[in-house]
Image (spheres, rainbow, N blue to C red):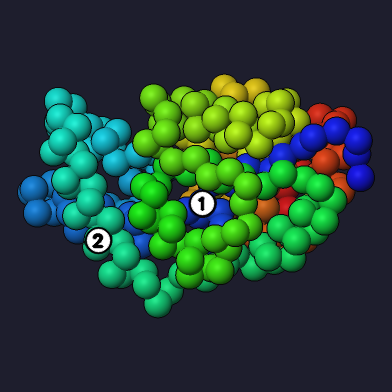
Amino acid sequence: MLNKKQAFIFDMDGVLTDNMQFHADSWVELFSDFGLQGLDADRYLVETAGMQGLDVLRYFLDPQINEEEAERLTNLKDFLYRVMSRDRIKAMPGLKLFLDAADQRGVKLGIGSGACPKNIDYVLGILDMTETFQAIVDPFQVRHGKPQPDIFLRAASLLGVPPSECIVFEDALPGVEAARKAGMQCVAVTTTNRAEAFSHFDNVLQVIDDFTSLCPDELLKKLNEKQPMTLL
């Protein structure tokens, strides 16, 4: 174990659980009620996955939508998401063993998610991980959501770890960009994007399909050495 504070900060949706398709389908259903037929789940996943609801609505529906109306529509979408996914949420393969190994090595564990607090509680409850993380940050705690770095910087601050000693786990391109802007290295997860989509990010240490082959010691060594990206 290294004699300094280090942290793993996880995006939740698409990282702790492979659930981004459920979110995408819920947005498509919501937007179809507004006559927006050109949006499909793949477009949402590529262009806006990881963004908070207000930004998604301004991107696809109305650039001038006010925050009150955006919150109402996001709550409707989140209700659809929970109904659709309740019996389908499960932990990513290898995740629990990886988290246990990191915790045993003294690595701080945090969440930096674009999800609302209710959805975070919902997923962590199903995964039985409510007490696993020492810091949980949602977009309501910061001024700007991803791709801005605010969420990850707040998580690092709450964990008491410098950004340079944090590794972010992300599936979405805006999230990887947020980690880059925060000065953090990143492990990219291919639940939402293909491995090639992450190739232009200079902060990606590794690209993984799941956590089964990931070792905390090797990852921390890469963080210290700033080794180039490896594809699994």
Q: Name the one closer to the observer, 43 or 149.
A: 149
Residue 177 is at least partly visible in this image: no
User: Quadrant of the rendered structure where residue 160 is?
Assistant: top right
Q: Which residue is mark 2?
A: 79
Residue 144 is at least partly visible in this image: yes
Q: Which residue is mark 1?
A: 12
Instruction: Give left or right: position of 31 versus 122.
Output: left
Give the image location of residue 192, x and y in percent: 49, 51
For the point 14% across and 31% down, the residue is: 65
Task: Name the quadrant of the N terminus.
Answer: top right
Task: Note whether 43 is above or below 128 in the view shown.
Answer: above
Q: Amino acid at mark 1?
A: Met
Give the image location of residue 23, x and y in percent: 34, 56
**Disc with the residue nearer the chain's start (2 vs 1):** 1
Q: Name the one closer to the observer, 183 or 151.
A: 151
Task: Note whether 132 is above or below 219 in the view shown.
Answer: below
User: Quadrant of the rendered structure where residue 161 is?
Assistant: top right
Q: Amino acid at mark 2?
A: Phe
Query: Dot 2, crowdedness within 10 Å: few (<14), some or many (≥20)?
Result: few
Give the image location of residue 135, x and y in percent: 58, 43
Give the image location of residue 156, x and y in percent: 63, 32
